Image (cartoon, rainbow, N blue to C red):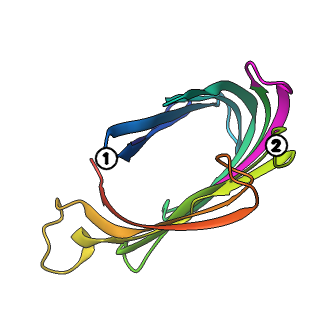
Amino acid sequence: MEKFHPDNWGSTYFFIDMDYTSEGVAAAYWEIARELKFWKGPFSAHLEYNGGLAKGFSYNNAYLAGATYTYNNASFSRGFTLTAMYKYIQKHRSPNNFQLTGTWYMNFCKNLLTFSGFADWWREETNYGKTIFLSEPQFWVNLNRIKGVNKNFNLSVGSEVELSNNFGGRDGFYVIPTLALKWTLN
């Protein structure tokens, strides 16, 4: 589940991920980020929290603060952000870190297709290294843009591919593809 909401002073974004097994929810993780902007221009102040729980362990709370550069074209059919942050990871043996995040979105073919995603690179001392990389590019076919399909039928069919290095307790680089369905609320 995810939500992006712009307002007069910036925007709020959050997502919640749950990992399921045959026994039910095995892990839950969430992030919430706030962009604050009381001025004109492409830069904003960024505040963020990350955390969660899993069977047998909990994710360390992480608190992030930094600055974001945002670009959207005039029609808001494509855009990107770049954010540089200080990252404090609570109860970590090396709590003071950094994170760089980029996000993007592109709607094309009269909004039939969407390419979106994020890439994170951060410092966090683990058993596998001192930096972690995670990216999840997504590609969607928006069914309500097909001629003859009701415009309120907000189902999209697509894929997300997790690209990671030293992430999630795994050593090295991994590619994990996923097929997905997505319903967008208006």
Residue lying farthest top?
91
Q: Residue at x 50, y 59 (%)?
A: 76
Q: Earlier in the sequence, mark 1 or mark 2?
A: 1
Checking the image for residue 127, the label placed there is: 2
Task: Give the distance between the C-alpha atoms of the residues marked 1 and 2, in whole angstroms.
Answer: 29 Å
Q: Quadrant of residue 122?
A: top right
Q: Quadrant of residue 18?
A: top left
Three-letter residue code for mark 1: Ser
Checking the image for residue 14, the label placed there is: none
Left or right, 144 with reference to 139: left
Please give the residue where the numbered disc 1 appears in the rendered image: 22
Three-letter residue code for mark 2: Asn
In this orientation, does residue 4 appear? no
Task: From the top left corner, tell me how far across and down residue 6 is, in percent.
Answer: 48, 38
Indicate whether residue 94 is drawn in magenta: yes
Which of the pair 24/163 is nearer the observer? Answer: 24
Element class at badge 2: loop
Q: Residue at x 73, y 20 (%)?
A: 90
Q: Give the magenta range.
A: 89-104
